[in-house]
Image: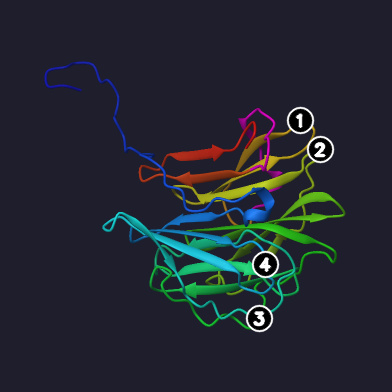
Amino acid sequence: AAAGDTQYLGWDGYQTISGSQMLYAGNGASGGSLPDVLRLKSGSVLAVHEAAGAAVLPAVQIFRYKPADEAWTTLSAALGVTGSKPNQVSPALAQDTVTGRVFLFVVSFTGLNLIMVSSDDDGATFTAGSSYQVLREDLPAGSTINEVRASYNNGQFVLFVQYTLSAVAEVAQYASTSGAARFDQVSANWSVSGEKPNSISVAPLTGGGFLLGYADGATTARYRSIRIGSAYEVAEDGTAVILVAQIPGGRPSISVWRDEDGAMYALAAVDEG
């Protein structure tokens, strides 16, 4: 409002999306996994994805953007994870906003669990890798993990795993209060009748809890979101809100995030993707 005005005209908030820069381009499914992007406590941005065609772990490419440099750089940190890679999986990033430690989750050599590595320098170097799998319960035998997404809020980590079993799209939910060292299974599959979640994203809510966004690949496909008050609250039991009432074309993809002012945003691929 200008000086002397008696009517409040609203607030011109943060310019949240000021442009974009291409990091990677490929020809559909053969071009690599969907990326995961995380804005760090320091203000830098990390982006990770799994490269196409790699037959061994970790097969993960890591990019970092520093606002001061106004440029993306490719990081070559060794993850210390080795073994055969069962399939191409979209990895996940999360950060403990108290300690600043960054966590990266990749599929284990069994294909039914995850391995976690961590970084205390914004992704420049990672730990040698844990020798154990972080999920206390494996996914069912015969499952294929496609996508992993994780988030931290108020001492809790939540982790969602999108997988297929017998050609049916499923989502398993896990939670941790032990610094992401081990995760308890909250829900083994997505039991909402008629829904087939085939792309997921999760972000912390102001004051606690999380927002889950997902693409429902069922016949009446659309993008939806669900709020949960705790990592241990079963997401599928919540009330879903329709974000985009349109059938996702091409390769479904959704990203949800919280801006500096606490506002929540969702970006979804529609039509031809």
Give the image location of residue 85, x and y in percent: 71, 71
How much space separates mark 4 and mark 2, taking CA atoms?
A: 26 Å
| 4 or 2: tag closer to the N-terminus | 4
Task: From the image, tell me which residue sits under label 3.
Answer: 132
Q: Which mark is residue 184?
A: 4
> Which residue occupies 59% across, 43% down?
254
Over which residues does the magenta segment extend? Answer: 233-252
Residue contact at pointers 2 and 1, CB within 8 angstroms: yes
Q: Disc 4 vs disc 2: which is toward the camera?
A: 2
Whether residues under marks 4 and 3 lie with C-beta atoms below 8 angstroms apart, the answer is no
Q: Nearer the viewer, mark 4 or mark 1?
A: 1
What kind of residue is marked 2?
Gly
**Mark 4 / mark 3, whichever is N-terminal:** 3
**In terms of secondary structure, where does tag 4 sit?**
strand
Q: Residues within 10 Å of mark 4 (few under 14, many from 20)?
A: some
Q: Nearer the viewer, residue 257 or 56?
A: 56
Instruction: Tell me residue 249's x, y (percent).
Output: 68, 35
Q: Which residue is mark 2?
A: 194
Residue corresponding to mark 1: 220
Name the residue at 81% across, 61% down.
Answer: 143
**Residue 251 is one of the magenta-drawn residues:** yes
Q: CA distance from mark 2 to mark 1?
A: 9 Å
**Amino acid type, residue under disc 4 in the picture:** Asp
Q: Position of residue 228 (x, y in %)?
A: 59, 47
In the shown orientation, is residue 165 left or right of residue 108? right
Report the residue that reaches farthest toward the left.
4
Residue at the limit of the structure toward the front, as seen here: 27
Q: Earlier in the sequence, mark 2 or mark 3?
A: 3
Quadrant containing the N terminus in the rendered view: top left
